[in-house]
Image (cartoon, rainbow, N blue to C red):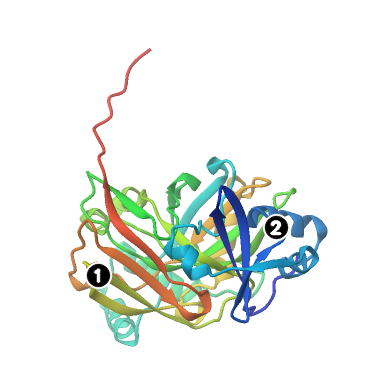
């Protein structure tokens, strides 16, 4: 299967009248892919046939046109990738990968020059600057890596994030997410990219960087659409928070390789070098990091707030509200 460079093709998964379907959007038109119930099925067929996703879609043909925005509003758009068994989806990510805005980048470099500010996180960021962009086909420095969960933690677009009652924060992370399907021999095939909100607990994380693992064990969301092929090197989007229908925080965010200290290939290589993540038939969703957070501006979210993340190449915006999930203290029983 061959990637399509800078393709404008986007895919979405919908459910209506008890039936699932895949929608392909290109040139402003959204149409159902014939005889296709999931993006996973489509990708696996393309891998087996040795052709691109676009070629597989052309082979199957396109059917009726749909109003994807209306389906999204009606809650009928799913995450753009899933698996019949959520245990076969790995959701993970890498951090300290982005250069940030010009102002933030200038501050970062000043901090790097001040040894008194050389925290472990700063040292890892410096390592990425120095060795995160190796020659093609070679390994660069390892990034920070974290585990989010399995497929059961992916909340659909427009769905609410159940923030656990023990959480100290409910914060957004507007990111680029890579979507991968492992072939029958374990080879990972990247099928595209989606907008992601890598929802995290930043207050817990800031208590001590060793709490990073705890802060990341939250739900997240991707979509609504999957951009097939290579993404633009310079992606500019907007992250905003709405409260009672009004924007209460808003900021542009930058992503794509032009705004990162690591190449995508280096981040992918360090994830998939572990055989655990190359199990045949499994799906991987990988978040590539961000430099834009409302918590960095001192903003405090609350239940009911709505996160909205948008960037032009990815079609419809990704929106999720903050909910709450009671999390009673578990008592372990002994057999």
Residue at x-position 47% and y-position 54%: 92
Please count the marks in the image. 2
Residue 21 or residue 119, whichever sits in front: 21
Image position of 166 (left or right of 60): left
Percent x, y for residue 244? Answer: 21, 66
The disc label shown at residue 270, or none: none
Q: Residue at x 54, y 70 (%)?
A: 67
Q: Is residue 20 visible?
A: yes
Question: In the visual, does 125 lie left or right of 300?
Answer: right
**At numbered mark 1, what does the secondary structure look like: helix, strand or loop?**
loop
Q: Is residue 232 above or below residue 24?
A: below
In percent of width and height, residue 64 lies at: 66, 67
Write the residue at 55% across / 70% down.
Answer: 264
Look at the image and tell me in which quarter the C terminus lies: top left
In the foreground, 81 or 18? 18
Q: For the residues marked 1 and 2, what is the alpha-carbon distance in whole angstroms?
A: 37 Å
Q: Residue furthest top?
A: 335
| Quadrant in the picture for residue 170 | bottom left
Disc 2 marks which residue? 42
Q: As displayed, is residue 169 above or below residue 57?
A: above
Can residue 144 be spotted in the picture?
no
Q: Quadrant of the N terminus?
A: bottom right
**Residue that numbered label 1 is attached to:** 245
Q: Is residue 69 left or right of residue 305?
A: right
Within 10 Å of disc 1 (Cα), the crowding (few <14, some 14-19, many 20+) is few
* Residue depicted at x 32% and y 62%: 120
Label 2: element kind:
helix
Looking at marks 1 and 2 on the same chain, the residue that comes earlier in the sequence is marked by 2
């Amino acid at each position: 299967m061959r990637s399509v460079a800078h393709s404008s093709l986007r895919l979405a998964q919908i459910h209506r009248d008890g039936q699932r379907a895949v929608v392909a959007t290109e040139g402003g038109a959204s149409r159902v892919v014939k005889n296709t119930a999931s993006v996973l099925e489509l990708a696996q067929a393309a891998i087996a046939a040795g052709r691109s996703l676009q070629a597989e879609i052309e082979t199957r043909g396109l059917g009726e046109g749909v109003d994807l925005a209306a389906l999204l509003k009606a809650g009928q758009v799913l995450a753009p990738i899933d698996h019949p068994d959520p245990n076969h989806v790995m959701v993970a990510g890498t951090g300290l990968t982005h250069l940030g805005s010009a102002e933030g980048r200038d501050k970062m470099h000043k901090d790097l020059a001040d040894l008194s500010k050389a925290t472990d996180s700063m040292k890892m960021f410096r390592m990425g600057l120095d060795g995160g962009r190796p020659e093609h086909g070679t390994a660069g420095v390892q990034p920070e890596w974290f585990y989010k969960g399995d497929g059961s933690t992916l909340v659909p677009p427009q769905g609410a994030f159940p923030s656990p009652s023990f959480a100290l924060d409910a914060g957004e992370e507007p990111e680029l997410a890579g979507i991968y399907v492992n072939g029958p021999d374990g080879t990972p095939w990247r099928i595209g990219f989606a907008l992601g909100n890598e929802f995290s607990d930043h207050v817990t994380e800031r208590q001590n960087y060793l709490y990073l693992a705890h802060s990341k064990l939250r739900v997240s969301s991707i979509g609504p659409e999957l951009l097939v092929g290579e993404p633009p090197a310079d992606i500019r989007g907007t992250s905003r928070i709405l409260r009672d229908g009004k924007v209460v925080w808003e900021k542009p965010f930058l992503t794509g390789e032009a705004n990162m200290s690591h190449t995508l290939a280096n981040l992918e290589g360090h994830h998939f070098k572990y055989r655990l993540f190359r199990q045949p038939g499994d799906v991987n969703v990988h978040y590539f990091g961000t430099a834009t957070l409302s918590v960095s501006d001192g903003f405090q979210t609350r239940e009911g707030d709505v996160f909205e993340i948008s960037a032009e190449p990815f079609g419809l915006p990704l929106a999720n509200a903050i909910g709450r999930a009671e999390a009673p203290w578990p008592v372990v029983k002994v057999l």
